[in-house]
Amino acid sequence: MGQKKLIIATLSLFLLFSCNSDITGVVLSNDIYSIRVKKIMQEYTEKKYDVLSKFLSDNVKSFYSTDIFIGKDQLINVFKSDFESFSNIALSSQEIYSIYNPDTTYTTVFRCTWNGIGNYTKNTYEIISYYKFTWKDNKIITINTFWDDSAFYKEFSLKNKNV
């Protein structure tokens, strides 16, 4: 490591530990949990759920916008249901990192722009989305999803109107 990088790393560590004695977590990049979440989200856009299924706890809790889903099967069905109302789903502008928490869990934050075309309105949507995966014993125990879900309501409303 170059001397300049070593000084910056030492200064960063000094500031991290000297300014705040209440350390809440350690940020990791390119860690195993970030890699897994990246793969889960890539498979989501391909309508595949093998990696997600492999790492979900059987009684995972998901806070998906305004709804709560409990259990592996229910959550996978929620992921699948997006394709009933949207096509060409893609994730752009992806950012990801994990945090090692003092309680020995890991939190992986995945931020992206969710892109899709409404199957009923034919509108093109770009929605900034945040996903927070909490890991314990190498299993996902919770997923929190934060985004503007008005596009989903538009599609659901038109779908139900046509039924």
Image (cartoon, rainbow, N blue to C red):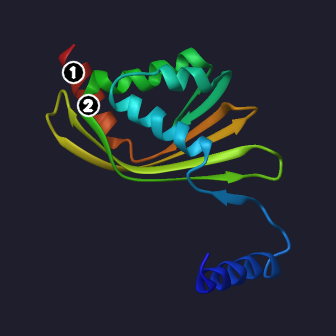
Name the quarter where the C terminus is drawn. top left
In front here: 27 or 162?
A: 27
At mark 1, the secondary structure is: helix
Looking at the rendered structure, the secondary structure element under dot 2 is helix
Q: Residue 38: image x %, image y %?
A: 47, 41
Q: Amino acid at mark 1?
A: Lys
Residues 61 and 136: in front is: 136
User: Where is residue 28 shown, x and y percent of the image?
Assistant: 64, 56
Say whether disc 1 or disc 2 marks the residue closer to the N-terminus.
2
On residue 161, the disc is 1
> Do callouts 1 and 2 mark residues in contact (Cβ within 8 Å)?
no
Identify the residue at horizontal 68%, vertical 21% (top origin): 59
The residue singled out by tag 2 in the image is: 155
Q: Toward which corner of the image does residue 55 lie, by quadrant?
A: top right
Q: Nearer the viewer, residue 92 or 118?
A: 92
Q: Vertical placement of 111 versus 115: above or below?
A: below
Which residue is found at the position 39% from the left and 35% from the top? 42
Instruction: Tell me the crowding category of disc 1: few under 14, some 14 to 19, or many 20 or more residues within 10 angstroms, Cα based.
Output: few
**Quadrant of residue 58 in the image?**
top right
Q: CA distance from mark 1 to mark 2?
A: 10 Å
Q: Which of the 4 image quarters holds residue 157?
A: top left
Task: Please state which amino acid type lies under the numbered disc 2.
Answer: Glu
